[in-house]
Image (spheres, grey):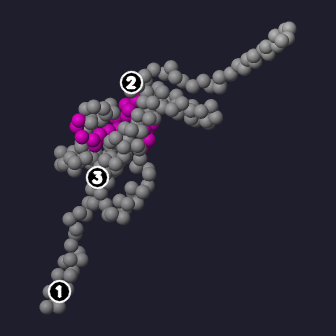
């Protein structure tokens, strides 16, 4: 009887788990807390403009939202279908930089976690999602005159990206020097001559 207990305990200890290919929850938490899996909207825009063949954009919103507006070349895989076997070939191809996005980061983060748990590689999330895309790429804020030179270079890139993505012309570029304001003084009016 002792031998049977030892054999069953040995089978339990040496049994290979069914989810051997999955990443452990501890490692998943560490990977998620590291912000390196986030890509900025500027980086994504740059890769789209340069037509990077390794970029694979995945819109995880529902099909109606995808049809209303999405990024050029994006594939629509709704979050509820992300683990369907038909998409596994996309995620297992290590030649791609897979970038998930949604309106914000919530659904994209969930897709990243689900697929990272399955131990797929090269998974990214566009920081801020399409809401941040609209603020940074489609309607970039004009830097203040006191901002560093890098802010003006970034603004120039964003305005060019805005034009590329059909967001308007580049006629709103900031002046390199602040506008000079002319101050004109009113002439004093003289008191009426003669008295009362």
The magenta-colored residue range is 39-64
Percent x, y for residue 181?
A: 68, 21
Q: Measure how far apart labels 2 and 3 are at the Cα level.
A: 33 Å
Mark 2 is surrounded, within 10 Å at the Cα level, by few (under 14), some (14 to 19) or many (20 or more) other residues, namely few
Q: Nearer the viewer, mark 1 or mark 3?
A: 3
Picture residue at 38% right of the left edge, 32% below the top: 48
> In the image, which is nearer the foreground, mark 1 or mark 2?
2
Percent coordinates x, y for residue 44 in the rendering: 40, 37
Labels 2, 3: front one:
2
> Counting residues from the N terminus, which is met first, the one under dot 2 or under dot 3?
3
**Front residue of this view, candidates 85 and 140:** 140
* Frontmost residue, 57 versus 15: 57
From what the image shows, is residue 77 above or below residue 165? Answer: below
Looking at the rendered structure, which numbered label has been put on residue 180? none
Q: Is residue 115 magenta?
A: no
> Magenta includes 40?
yes
Q: For mark 1, what is the residue? A: 5
> Where 21 sits versus 111, above or below?
below
Q: Residue at x 14, y 86 (%)?
A: 4
Secondary element type, mark 1: helix
Residue at image mark 2: 166
- Residue sitting at 45 percent across and 20 percent down? 169
Mark seen at residue 115: 3
Q: Residues within 10 Å of mark 1 (few under 14, many from 20)?
A: few
Q: Quadrant of residue 146?
A: top right
* Residue 1 can be seen in this image: yes
> Does residue 187 sit above or below 42 in this rendering?
above
Q: Are marks 2 and 3 in contact (CB under 8 Å)?
A: no
Q: CA distance from mark 1 to mark 2?
A: 71 Å
């Amino acid at each position: 009887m002792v031998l049977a207990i030892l054999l069953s305990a040995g089978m339990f200890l040496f049994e290979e788990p069914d989810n051997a290919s999955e990443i452990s929850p501890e490692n998943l938490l560490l990977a998620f807390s590291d912000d390196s899996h986030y890509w900025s909207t500027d980086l994504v825009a740059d890769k789209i403009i340069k037509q990077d063949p390794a970029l694979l954009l995945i819109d995880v919103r529902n099909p109606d939202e995808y049809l209303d507006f999405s990024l050029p070349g994006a594939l629509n895989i709704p979050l509820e279908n992300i683990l369907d076997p038909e998409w596994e070939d996309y995620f297992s191809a290590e030649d791609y930089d897979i970038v998930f996005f949604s309106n914000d980061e919530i659904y994209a983060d969930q897709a990243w976690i689900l697929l990272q748990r399955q131990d797929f590689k090269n998974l990214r999330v566009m920081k801020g999602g399409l809401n941040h895309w609209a603020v940074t790429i489609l309607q970039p804020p004009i830097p203040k005159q006191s901002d560093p030179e890098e802010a003006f270079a970034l603004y120039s890139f964003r305005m060019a990206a805005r034009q590329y993505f059909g967001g308007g012309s580049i006629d709103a570029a900031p002046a390199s020097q602040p506008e000079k304001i002319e101050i004109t003084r009113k002439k004093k009016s003289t008191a009426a001559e003669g008295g009362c």
